Amino acid sequence: MKFFLSIATIAVYATAFLSLVACSNDKSIAGIEIGNPSIADSDTTARDTTAKDTSVKDTSVKDTTPKDTAVKKQPALPLVADFSIDYSEVNLKALAKEAEKDEPILLDSFSLILTEVRSFSSYYYTTLIVDPVVGLQLWPYEDSPNESLEISFTKGSLIEDPFKDIDLNEEGYLKEMGVGFKPDETMAIFGRILIDKKYHPFVYSLSNFQTLMLRYHYSQIDTAGGKANLSVVFRVKQFTDGIDFSSAEIGEDSVIHIDSKYNSELWNAMNERFVTSFQPLRYDYTTVAGDAHFEYVADIWKGIAAKKGENTIINGNFSSPFTTDWILMNQFGGHSDTTVLLEKGAKERIMQVNVTDGGKHSYSVQLIQENVALIAGVQYQCIFTIWSDVEGQITARIGSYNTYETIGFQEHVQVQTTGQSVGITFTPEVSDPFARFELNLGGSERTFWIKEVKVLRIN
């Protein structure tokens, strides 16, 4: 169900970027341990420590199997997008199903104007300073800011050449792709509805929508064949199932008009389903009245979030090759490296973090995993085993990757020289598909061993 885009080896942290995201006096920014004001208030290194550390470091987590560990530029990952309609039951892995003769509703003409394409990425491996909330505009390009494209869903539009200068490997670790639309000049979807074994033409007005942004989770994007293919599919079953058209008023022109004036109840019901029928992870749209709406799509979110008893941490036993799941962060004078070991006499793999310079703070060295999907009000338990060659305290935390606020928990853990299991139960107050689990291991020179990291959904 879950996988990560292998976008790049983490290699370079731009000095200006770190100065912005890790050195701010804002206590919600990276590096500040939320809930520990004494650390925040005594942080006097924010102005100069990172700026002096300009050496290029390979901070990627390494496996011990022989390999060439030289940093290499990843091949380009161009973006292509296709736009279509689908008449099947909602099945995200199935190929789109064509219309059959007895479909209860057929779409004859449906177009939107594509206004923008955005990526929403993690900060790592990028020299760009990007607001993670608004993302990075990939298209239209700066030299043609007003460019737009008419997209026909009924004819099936494939967009490749206009995106030829997009390389997603240069934009950080991809989390979401966003596509922005507005209605075309027809402001409507045209089709036919089957009532009493006879098809009646209908016109569904899109006048309720001014703009919309659909945001697709990285796991919804196909990267086979060296391209990132974003499929934007409008699912007719999702749009119309459960709606009773039998009482629809047919106009004098023999057309069923569905808008604010005619068949308004049907119009409101279809308005509620229109955006979610694209099946993104989440969306936002603005109505013609200027009202803004933002929400997750329930069934997509359900497929991404962990089920009861399932571990939402990816590769928590360190058995898979590392791509973007585990990230080692050195900052504020901290220096460390990692190795994955096979535990003697067992098949369990252990993450060894060798802190050669602890820096001045616990967050000078961080072992991080983002993309931990958490649901508000659901109880979770974080479990991991850890020990060190030197007894001392670390900080375990789950926060937001884009605001760095604590949204799960923050606990100070006393680490012993023998293995101990740590268990922390928590209930997040907000839903977040990209929560950030971190172990803050800095502050002193020592070596840690970590295994079996889990964030389990327990109800």
Image (cartoon, grey):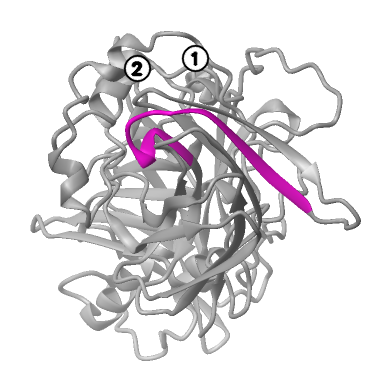
* Residue 164 x, y percent position in the rendering: 53, 17
Q: In the rendered image of this protein, does residue 45 appear above or below residue 293?
A: above
Q: Quadrant of residue 408?
A: bottom left
Q: Quadrant of the N terminus?
A: bottom right
Q: Which disc number belongs to residue 165?
A: 1
In this rendering, position of residue 14 left or right of residue 416: left
Q: Is residue 124 left or right of residue 114?
A: right
Position in image of residue 341 (x %, y %): 78, 42
Q: Are marks 1 and 2 in contact (CB under 8 Å)?
A: yes
Give the farthest residue toward the right. 345
Please name whichever residue, 114 or 218, is drawn nearer the observer in this view of the structure.
218
Q: Is residue 254 visible?
A: no
Vertical side of 300 occupied by 53: above or below:
above
107 to 425, vertically: above or below? above
- Residue 90 versus residue 26: which sits nearer the camera? 26
Q: Which residues are magenta?
A: 349-366
**Magenta part, dominant SS:** strand
Q: Type of residue at label 1?
A: Asp
Which circle marks residue 141 in the picture? Answer: 2
Q: Decide: few, some or many residues near mark 2? Use Cα within 10 Å; few <14, some 14-19, many ≥20.
A: some
Mark 1: few/some/many CA within 10 Å (<14, 14-19, 20+): some
Residue sitting at x 9%, y 55%: 290
